[in-house]
């Protein structure tokens, strides 16, 4: 028996595309919620599988964004640039299709650099999985935009961090605002011509370099082709002594200056972690990571191409990591810059 359930994760996204929540997925969700509730009491008991996964279609990008691990690696010449193959994606999908309700097609690289991406999304959509894609839009052509709109994609996030070439290029190093805007226009035109219900979300990081443009983009995002706008606080490295990209108004920053003269996260992560107990990341190489903050793959639980997801997610290694989060989350490197 299947129930057609509209994605209600947030009223911020008034989506009309739905995912299929069958009895197996529903039971898995209930198990995950129960497991997370136990974690709040300091108990690690995992009998479920992830309810959502982030899959990495490509581990490289065209840009060299200063606060992105991929952007930092792009400055090196010996970086390995890999794409998720269709064979490997089908292997992943086969293992997650009865447990996950949502699949995010992004992690560290630019997903649209994988030419098989529209077909991957279509396959996940056929399994009743809610699909989300995040892109810098630089590789978006009219043809690719049409393929995405026809794939069953639920939501696409387009990141554009400036309304002038100067403000855009301050963070999106190596990119072109004009090209990104052309991609966004192509998406809107493809959506209108195909009648797709894919939700187009425009996203801008709140940076010092674009803070004079926040009100403008808030007024113009629909004319630019988006259905909604998210102004997102930026995650910064080496923020303790301040950062040139940090907004001048601390209200719009993840960090606040305290009495010791150093900047700290406004909100410290709690003892437990909902993402860790309900999802995971699967890299282009098949490594299963605890969450999207493990950007350098420091804590792999196992590899989905050589072991089953059930074995990996229920392994001693995974549970030891969950226990370490409950005991000393504030000292873990990947948790130190996480805003709950």
Image (cartoon, rainbow, N blue to C red):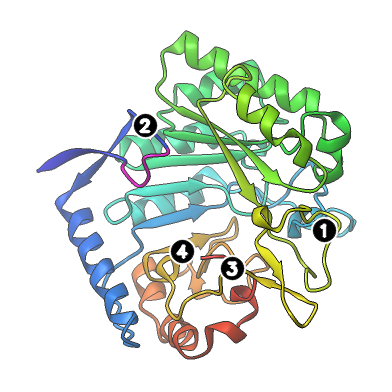
> Image point 56% across, 46% down: which residue?
85
Q: Nearer the viewer, mark 3 or mark 4?
A: 3
Helix, strand or loop at disc 1? helix
Q: Earlier in the sequence, mark 3 or mark 4?
A: 4
Q: Earlier in the sequence, mark 3 or mark 2?
A: 2
> Image point 76% across, 48% down: which residue?
207
Separation of residues labelled 4 and 1 (CA atoms): 24 Å
**Is 11 a magenta residue?**
yes
- In this orientation, which residue lies closer to the viewer: 256 or 197? 256
Residue furthest to the front in view is 259
Write the start and end of the magenta stretch as one range. 8-12
Disc number placed over residue 72 in the picture, else none: 1
Q: Position of residue 161 (x, y in %)?
A: 73, 39
Q: Position of residue 212 (x, y in %)?
A: 78, 37
Q: Nearer the viewer, mark 2 or mark 1?
A: 2
Helix, strand or loop at disc 2? loop
Q: Is residue 230 above or below residue 334?
A: above
Residue receiving disc 3:
338
Separation of residues labelled 3 and 1 (CA atoms): 19 Å
Q: Nearer the viewer, mark 4 or mark 2?
A: 2
Residue receiving disc 4:
280
Disc number placed over residue 15 in the picture, else none: 2
Separation of residues labelled 4 and 2 (CA atoms): 24 Å
Quadrant containing the N terminus is: top left
Q: Is residue 147 above or below residue 261?
A: above
Q: Is residue 280 left or right of residue 255?
A: left
């Amino acid at each position: 028996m299947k129930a057609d359930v509209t994605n209600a994760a947030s009223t911020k996204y008034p989506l009309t595309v739905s995912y299929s929540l069958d009895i197996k997925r529903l039971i898995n969700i209930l198990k995950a919620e129960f497991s997370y509730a136990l974690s709040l009491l300091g108990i690690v008991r995992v009998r479920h599988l992830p309810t959502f996964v982030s899959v990495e279609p490509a581990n490289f990008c065209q840009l060299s964004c200063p606060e992105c691990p991929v952007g930092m690696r792009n400055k090196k010449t010996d970086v390995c640039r890999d794409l998720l193959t269709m064979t490997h994606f089908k292997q992943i999908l086969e293992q997650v299709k009865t447990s996950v309700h949502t699949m995010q097609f992004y992690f560290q690289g630019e997903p649209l650099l994988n030419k098989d991406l529209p077909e991957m999304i279509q396959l996940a959509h056929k399994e009743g999985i809610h699909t989300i894609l995040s892109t810098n839009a630089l590789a978006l052509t009219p043809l690719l935009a049409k393929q995405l709109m026809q794939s069953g994609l639920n939501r696409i996030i387009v990141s554009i961090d400036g309304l002038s070439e100067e403000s855009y290029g301050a963070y999106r190093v190596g990119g072109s605002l004009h090209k990104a805007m052309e991609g966004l226009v192509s998406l809107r035109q493809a959506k209108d011509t195909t009648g797709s219900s894919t939700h187009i979300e425009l996203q801008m990081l709140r940076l010092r370099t674009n803070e004079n443009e926040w009100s403008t983009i808030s007024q113009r995002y629909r004319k630019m082709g988006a259905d909604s706008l998210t102004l997102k606080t930026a995650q910064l490295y080496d923020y303790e002594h301040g950062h040139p990209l940090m907004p001048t108004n601390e209200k719009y920053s993840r960090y606040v200056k305290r009495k010791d003269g150093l900047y700290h996260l406004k909100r410290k992560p709690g003892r437990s972690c909902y993402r860790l107990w309900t999802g995971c990341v699967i890299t282009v190489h098949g490594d299963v990571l605890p969450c999207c903050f493990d950007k350098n793959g420091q804590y792999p639980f196992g590899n989905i191409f050589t072991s089953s997801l059930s074995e990996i997610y229920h392994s001693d290694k995974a549970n030891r990591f969950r226990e370490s989060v409950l005991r000393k989350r504030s000292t873990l490197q990947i948790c130190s810059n996480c805003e709950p």
